[in-house]
């Protein structure tokens, strides 16, 4: 669950920009709204308190004036005067009906003899009452004026917020407490309206910012996405893919540069393709143009060679030299053309499911005569069951011919082992000789073109010096490896590893590449080691 | 073997090579005739009625491939291509256009002569025998001495090479022949050579006798090994 969300989050720039905008603008707008709302509410409240205090002060002075005529709590005029007083106090000039409630409470010092008097917007009923908060009452009893915001009920009406002001009324003979209940309906209403407005406005602002962010990022992200898609198509080989350039802004420049890049790439690729095609053509032409006359020369040389007995000795020897060198020349030409085919990149793998056992055997057998001549025992070890792999049989044969030929030539009369093995994913052939071996660093050099371990060494097979380079290319073409290890005086091991299925990636080889002598073969899956030296099928 | 001197038509535009080929072929007991361009090759073929054709693939005028197709269209005479290209595309293209075998320049004269002899020899060691492969609904009968093949009693025209290939497979039905063994038995190669020869000719043979060459029943592929003749 969390993973797709994280992936979407990381995958979409637009989503991230919108989310960040949404969060930060919400925080900012909320803070702004709180500050503004609070200062408006506070201002309203302060204003109300100031006004109320004035009303209270006026009322107090008027009440003291009216009440000072009374002699005491037992004065019979008290109810009338007090009723009259609260009525006057509750009545505001120029206004029909009272905006507030006035309560005249006798001080507790005067005893419970006198009931409180009240007037205002309320509708006094038998059970109805107003409650003055105890804190305020205590404060007034202590002889101080004060106020307190409360939510309370006046008579049977629903509870409302009030600002309650209280002040002591002390004349010479009488002690009363005067309370004003100023309803805060207006102020609550206004501050409610303000917060609603702020909330709605803020929400709208936040959403607008989010939409704006989405639009702006879309404006930027869309061309970037188009560029990414176009780049993918380009790399998939659709070289004619381009972006549309609109306007002259940064995005248009992006599209323009992108197209320029694509254009250059396309030109380069086309140029390289053309070069490869020309190279191929050239190789093909050279091949034909050289091979036709060479064929004639070859046949002529053969004819001379076969009748050399009739020639004087110098001419006879010349015919022999001609023959031998023509062989070398042919081999060299063939391998040069093969190398140039690899270099031009048009060597083709012609793979097919092939059993490698007979191939290994037949190649080894073809070196039987040479092995006999060099006094080398050529031992072949292949699995008893068919080793079928998807390979290009001709190329594998060529690699094996190179490896086995080199091994026999460099074995110095000691045995050469050829081993074939397969795993689920790969097949491998190792060719081990116990001859002159390789000096440190030469494991890589042997695959270089025209490299020779010791240029002064007499050549027996007349190799061209290109054999191993071609073999490496053949292995690479299969997606395989060709490697070597060696030590002077101990010998060398060459290993060819090819994937079982054409196109698979190689991870490991079924045979180890080591100079250590293998343990005597006890695996019943392998045929007994056979000496291929001298064995000829023909 | 007592044979008439075999007549060879050499189609090659290189005069030196043609002359040299002539010397070698005469030494080896052939009677060569020459033609140097593709357009005249077909009429020369009709005039001479050679036993075997040596055909260079790169020719002025009509290409060697087209000449090969034209000759193959009217005759099953063995054709050996001479080619400077050993790339698979070129070789397969030549074989598919009807050539029986090919030698890559520069070839050794002995190699060429061996290839030609192998093609001329044919299946002359024929004993009177009839071979049958296939299922009752799809029956191929090979009359070896008469050199005829019938598919459900209808005669099928095969080139001598295709005939030899079919006979080799049909003589031991169910036995799997590797490409190497077929190369040796049919083409006369002593050492493993180019298995593409076998692949292409099996395809050609299938195209002539299989009802559905994509899904062969008479000549089956044994993956990783070779081919065998199916029998019901």
Image (tube, rainbow, N blue to C red):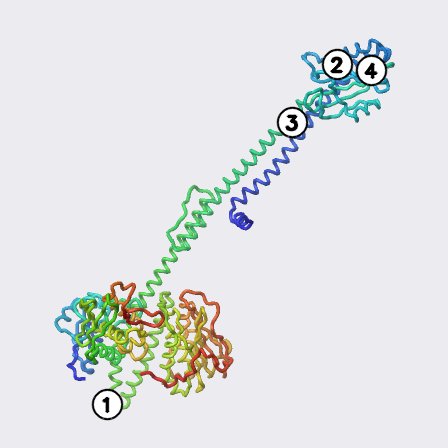
Residue found at the very far left of the displayed protein: B47
Mark 4 — residue? A114
Q: CA distance from mark 4 to mark 2?
A: 19 Å
For the point 80% across and 20% down, which residue is it? Answer: A167
From the image, which quarter does the C terminus of chain B lie in?
A: bottom left
Q: Chain of mark 4?
A: A
Residue behind mark 2: A89
Note whether B171 is above or below A225 in the view shown: below
Q: Nearer the viewer, mark 4 or mark 2?
A: 4
Q: Quadrant of residue A357?
A: bottom left
Q: Which mark is residue A310?
A: 1
Q: Tell me the CA gap for discs 3 and 4.
A: 40 Å
Sequence-first disc among 4 and 2: 2
Above or below residue A398? Residue A532 is: below
Task: State whether discs 3 and 4 lie on one chain.
Answer: yes
Residue bearing mark 3 = A191
Q: Say whether disc 1 or disc 4 marks the residue closer to the N-terminus.
A: 4
Q: CA distance from mark 2 to mark 3?
A: 28 Å
Going from N to C along the chain, the mark reached first, 1 or 3, is 3
Dot 1 and dot 4 within a common chain: yes
Residue A535 in the figure: left or right of residue B107 = right
Dot 2 or dot 3: first in sequence order is 2
Residue at the (34%, 79%) spot, across then down: A328
Chain letter of mark 1 equals A
């Amino acid at each position: 669950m969390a993973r797709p969300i994280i992936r979407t989050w990381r995958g979409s720039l637009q989503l991230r920009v919108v989310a960040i905008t949404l969060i930060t603008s919400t925080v900012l707008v909320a803070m702004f709204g709180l500050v503004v709302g609070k200062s408006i509410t506070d201002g309203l409240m302060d204003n109300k308190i100031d006004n109320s205090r004035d009303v209270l002060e006026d009322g107090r002075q008027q009440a003291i004036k009216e009440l000072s005529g009374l002699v005491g709590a037992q004065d019979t005029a008290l109810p009338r005067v007090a009723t009259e007083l609260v009525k006057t106090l509750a009545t505001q000039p120029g206004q029909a009906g009272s905006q507030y409630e006035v309560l005249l409470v006798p001080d507790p010092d005067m005893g419970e003899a006198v009931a409180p008097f009240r007037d205002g917007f309320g509708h006094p009923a038998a059970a109805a009452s107003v409650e003055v908060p105890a804190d305020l009452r205590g404060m007034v009893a202590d002889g101080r004026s004060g106020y307190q915001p409360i939510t309370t009920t006046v008579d049977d009406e629903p509870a409302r917020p009030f600002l309650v002001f209280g002040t002591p009324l002390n004349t010479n003979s009488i002690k009363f407490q005067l309370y004003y209940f100023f309803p805060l309906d207006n102020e609550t209403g206004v501050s409610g309206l303000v917060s609603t407005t702020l909330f709605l406005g803020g929400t709208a602002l936040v959403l607008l910012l989010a939409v704006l962010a989405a639009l702006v990022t879309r404006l930027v992200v869309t061309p970037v996405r188009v560029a990414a898609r176009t780049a993918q198509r380009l790399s998939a080989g659709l070289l004619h893919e381009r972006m549309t350039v609109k306007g002259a802004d940064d995005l248009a420049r992006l599209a323009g540069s992108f197209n320029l890049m694509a254009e250059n790439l396309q030109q380069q690729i086309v140029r390289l393709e053309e070069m490869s095609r020309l190279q191929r053509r050239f190789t093909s032409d050279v091949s034909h143009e050289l091979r036709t006359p060479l064929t004639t020369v070859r046949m002529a040389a053969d004819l001379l060679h076969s009748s050399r007995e009739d020639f004087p000795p110098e001419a006879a020897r010349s015919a022999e030299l001609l023959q031998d060198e023509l062989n070398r020349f042919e081999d060299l030409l063939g391998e040069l053309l093969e190398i140039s085919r690899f270099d031009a990149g048009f060597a083709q793998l012609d793979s097919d499911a092939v059993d490698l056992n007979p191939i290994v055997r037949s190649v080894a057998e073809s070196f039987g005569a040479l092995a006999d001549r060099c006094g080398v025992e050529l031992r072949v070890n292949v699995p008893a069951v068919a080793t079928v792999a998807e390979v290009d049989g001709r190329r594998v044969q060529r690699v094996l011919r190179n490896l086995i030929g080199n091994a026999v030539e460099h074995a110095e009369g000691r045995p050469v082992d050829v081993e074939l093995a397969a795993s689920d994913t790969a097949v491998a052939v190792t060719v081990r000789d116990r001859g002159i071996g390789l000096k440190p660093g030469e494991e890589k050099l042997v695959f270089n073109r025209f490299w020779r371990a010791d240029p002064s060494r007499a050549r027996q097979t007349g190799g061209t010096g290109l054999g191993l380079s071609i073999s490496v290319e053949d292995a690479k073409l299969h997606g395989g490896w060709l490697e070597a290890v060696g030590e002077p005086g101990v010998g060398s091991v060459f290993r060819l590893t090819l994937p079982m299925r054409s196109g698979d990636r190689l991870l490991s080889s079924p045979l180890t590449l080591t100079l250590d002598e293998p343990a005597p073969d006890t695996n019943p899956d392998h045929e007994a080691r056979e000496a291929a030296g001298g064995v000829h099928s023909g | 073997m007592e044979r008439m001197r075999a007549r060879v038509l050499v189609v090659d535009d290189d005069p030196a090579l043609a002359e040299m080929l002539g010397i070698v072929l005469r030494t080896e007991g052939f009677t060569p005739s020459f033609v140097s361009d593709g357009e005249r090759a077909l009429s020369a073929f009709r005039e001479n009625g050679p036993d075997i054709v040596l055909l260079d693939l790169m020719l002025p005028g009509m290409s060697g491939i087209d000449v090969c197709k034209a000759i193959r269209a009217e005759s099953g005479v063995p054709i050996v291509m001479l080619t400077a290209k050993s790339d698979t595309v070129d070789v397969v293209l030549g074989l598919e256009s009807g050539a029986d075998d090919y030698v890559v320049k520069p070839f050794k004269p002995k190699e060429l002569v061996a290839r030609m002899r192998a093609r001329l020899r044919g299946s002359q060691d024929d004993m009177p025998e009839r071979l049958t492969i296939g299922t009752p609904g799809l029956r191929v009968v090979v009359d070896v001495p008469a050199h005829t093949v019938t598919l459900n009693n209808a005669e099928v025209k095969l080139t001598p090479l295709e005939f030899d290939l079919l006979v080799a497979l049909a003589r031991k039905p169910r036995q799997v022949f590797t490409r190497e063994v077929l190369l040796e038995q049919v083409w006369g190669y002593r050492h493993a050579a180019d298995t593409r020869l076998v692949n292409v000719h099996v395809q050609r043979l299938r195209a002539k006798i299989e009802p559905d060459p994509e899904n062969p029943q008479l000549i089956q592929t044994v993956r990783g090994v070779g081919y065998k003749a199916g029998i019901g």
